[in-house]
Image (tube, rainbow, N blue to C red):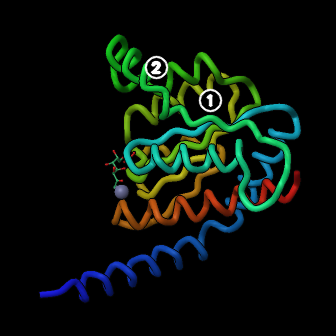
Amino acid sequence: MNFINLINNSILDHVKALDCLKANSISDINTAGLKISNAFKQGKKLLLIGNGGSAADAQHIAAEFTGRFCKERIALPAIALTTDTSALTAIGNDYGFEQIFARQIEALGSDGDVLIAFSTSGNSPNILKAVEIAKHKGLIIIGMSGNEEGKLNILCDINININHKNTARIQEMHILIGHILCESVESLF
Ligand SMILES: O=C(CO)[C@@H](O)[C@H](O)[C@H](O)[C@H](O)COP(=O)(O)O
Ligand SMILES: [Zn+2]
């Protein structure tokens, strides 16, 4: 008994997801980096949302901007809306789980801010509600998804879609894209 087959299959699957990213998303990642840089240069901020592993991705990328990624530069304003347990539990309890991000965006989002919405299914109701209100408030929406048929795809200004069946592999591409965005934006500050 060993895990060798599982390990080989996971690596092969990861490479397939990487090929898909390379073939389809380079221009969109470039546009996303420029939009985030321009927003920061205009004094706007970046908000990030996601569920489960993608909540961790949202926090991870926000921290790269407020802290630093590869070089010394000014602190950049990025906030993950996945971290405030009081807000998440109060909004979830009083308005429903679908509203946990939407309500925070209503409170904190402004015209010209950027929202990164991570959702591997592209169909999580709390993500879709958040994107709806963000659109209404004039935020620029970058969707990171993984299901060609997800509803998120058509709601975003920039849609970075990893066409793959496996949630973990999609998330691995999302964190790579997140790091590339950090390095691209950081190079301009
Ligand atoms: O990390 C993982 C799987 O790798 C899970 O926690 C996963 O993020 C959760 O099932 C999420 O609820 C999935 O949501 P979404 O990506 O479809 O919006
Ligand atoms: Zn996971």
- Asked if marks 1 and 2 touch (Cβ < 8 Å), the reply is no
Residue occupying the far top of the picture: 94
Q: Secondary structure at mark 1?
A: helix
- Mark 1, other Cα within 10 Å: few <14 / some 14–19 / many ≥20: some
Which of the two residues, 2 or 135, is positioned nearer the viewer here? 2
Q: Is residue 89 above or below residue 75?
A: above
- Label total for image: 2
**Residue 143 spot, x, y in % from top left:** 56, 47
Identify the residue at horizontal 17%, vertical 86% (top origin).
2
Disc 1 C-beta below 8 A from ligand 1: no
**Residue 9 spot, x, y in % from top left:** 31, 83
Horizontal side of 148 relative to 1 (left or right) equals right
Q: Secondary structure at mark 2?
A: helix
Amino acid under disc 2: Ala
Horizontal side of 97 relative to 131 (left or right) equals left
Q: According to the image, label 1 marks what residue?
A: 135
The mark found on residue 87 in the picture is 2
Identify the residue at horizontal 45%, vertical 49% (top origin).
54
> Which of labels 1 and 2 is toward the front?
2
Identify the residue at horizontal 66%, vertical 50% (top origin).
64
The mark found on residue 91 in the picture is none
Sequence order check, earlier mark of 1 and 2? 2
Q: Is residue 9 above or below residue 113?
A: below
The alpha-carbon separation of the residues under discs 1 and 2 comes to 21 Å
Q: Report whether residue 154 is seen.
A: no
Amino acid under disc 1: Lys
Q: Is residue 156 above or below residue 148?
A: above
**Residue 176 spot, x, y in % from top left:** 58, 65
Which of the two residues, 182 or 34, is positioned nearer the viewer here? 182
Image quarter hosting the N terminus = bottom left
